[in-house]
Amino acid sequence: MKNLFKSLLLPAIALVALPLMTSCESDDDSNPTLLYPTSFVLNTPAYATSNIYDLSKSETVTLTCSQPDYGYPAITIYEVQVAIDQSFSSYTTLETTYTTAKMDVDGVELNNTVVNLYQQANGGADPSGIIFPIYIRLQAHVSGTTDTYCYSNTISLSKVAVSYVATVPSTVYVAGSSIHGGSSAKTFAPTYGFDGQFYAMAYLASGSTFFWGDSTDPTNGYSLTTSIDDVAGAGISAGSDGGIQVANSDWYVLYLSLDVENNQLISALTVYPASAYVIGEIEGGNWIDEDASWAMTKPADASSQWVSPEFIAGGELRAYIKVPDIDWWRTEFTLYGGNLYWRTVDIANNWAENVGSAYSVTCEAGQRLYVDFDYDTGEVK
């Protein structure tokens, strides 16, 4: 593993991992009581004050903590929160989560988070070459719960150096006045098997604009998109707000390909006509891709649902958004808890066997699939 720190005066010193601490003892009761701790301890790394953390060149930064005392050895999810001011008036929660009290935090993810925080606080100024402190705390909760959150103390890494490192985000969002009624962003689905490629179905009204990016407040508009291919004839142009403007109202599939070249994020957006299909057992065993007789009917706007043809046989639901020149199963979805769940794994046989019974929807002849592609929810009835 690469050395994590650079000293101003000394040679690189290997990171010494602090021993793990735990405040959680075994509960021998067959029915342990869940406790609700208010805090736990995040340890300060041994060299946090004497060495420079050059985050853009660090493979990982190791953090250790005590486990929150939930009354028994609960499976705990840890999230790393980062700020550049000690008061944590503005902070970012890293996307990567952890399940152990020793966390090897990705150096580039931490670096780019700090760069973004610095630029937000300093009018977009470049922090490269500046040595400054950052502050870290942990948020923890019991896996599968929403009422057990607690926070660690805040620690400081007093000497941090950062520089922008272009990366392909693992999650991408799109937002605009016609998406979720203009109230929130929508998540792109990852194209199965194609790294850095994402797709989303959206209704875009005439004159509306949209932005994409790696946060729920995306800012990449027309000028920050490397190339745009308007296959659907949407009438794409630069909006007065800097967004990507659409002239013609309709449903569209937005397909985004991202790559890094010369430390720059290269983005290619293709706008396709929107279409979605059902396939497989519910069609009587028909596995023909883009069979027009099994196309879902699109509504007039985002206020209504897409509706499939009536199923002619019982079986497992298989459905997909169609992206031209891409196999249907790369953009497949199912229903999970009433929401669309996008395929991200190999399905050799079916959702039930290869993903889990909870992700498999059993259909009957005479039923239909109904989908709200604005909020990505659906039902079979």
Image (cartoon, helix red, strand yellow):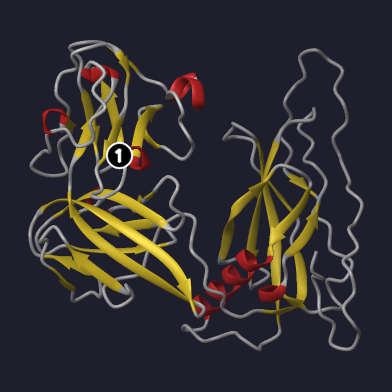
Q: Residues within 10 Å of mark 1 (few under 14, many from 20)?
A: many
| Snapshot quadrant of residue 272 | bottom left
| Snapshot quadrant of residue 80 | bottom right
Look at 89% across and 69% down and name the residue there: 14
Is 350 on the left or on the right of 132, as rendered?
left
Look at 87% across and 26% down and name the residue there: 26
Is 283 on the left or on the right of 107, as rendered?
left
Q: Which amino acid lies under the numbered mark 1 shown in the image of this protein?
A: Trp
Is 11 on the left or on the right of 201, as rendered?
right
Which sits in the foreground, 183 or 275? 275
Place of residue 173 in the rendered image (x, y in percent of width and height, measured from the top left): 37, 56
- Residue 98 to residue 271: above or below: above
Which sits in the foreground, 93 or 129? 129
Q: Which residue is mark 1?
A: 328
Place of residue 81 in the rendered image (x, y in percent of width and height, measured from the top left): 63, 58
Residue 183 appears in the figure: yes
Classify the position of the N terminus by image quarter: bottom right
- Residue 164 to residue 318: above or below: below
**Local secondary structure at mark 1:** helix
Classify the position of the C terminus by image quarter: top left
Which sits in the foreground, 27 or 36? 27
Look at 21% across and 10% down and name the residue there: 365
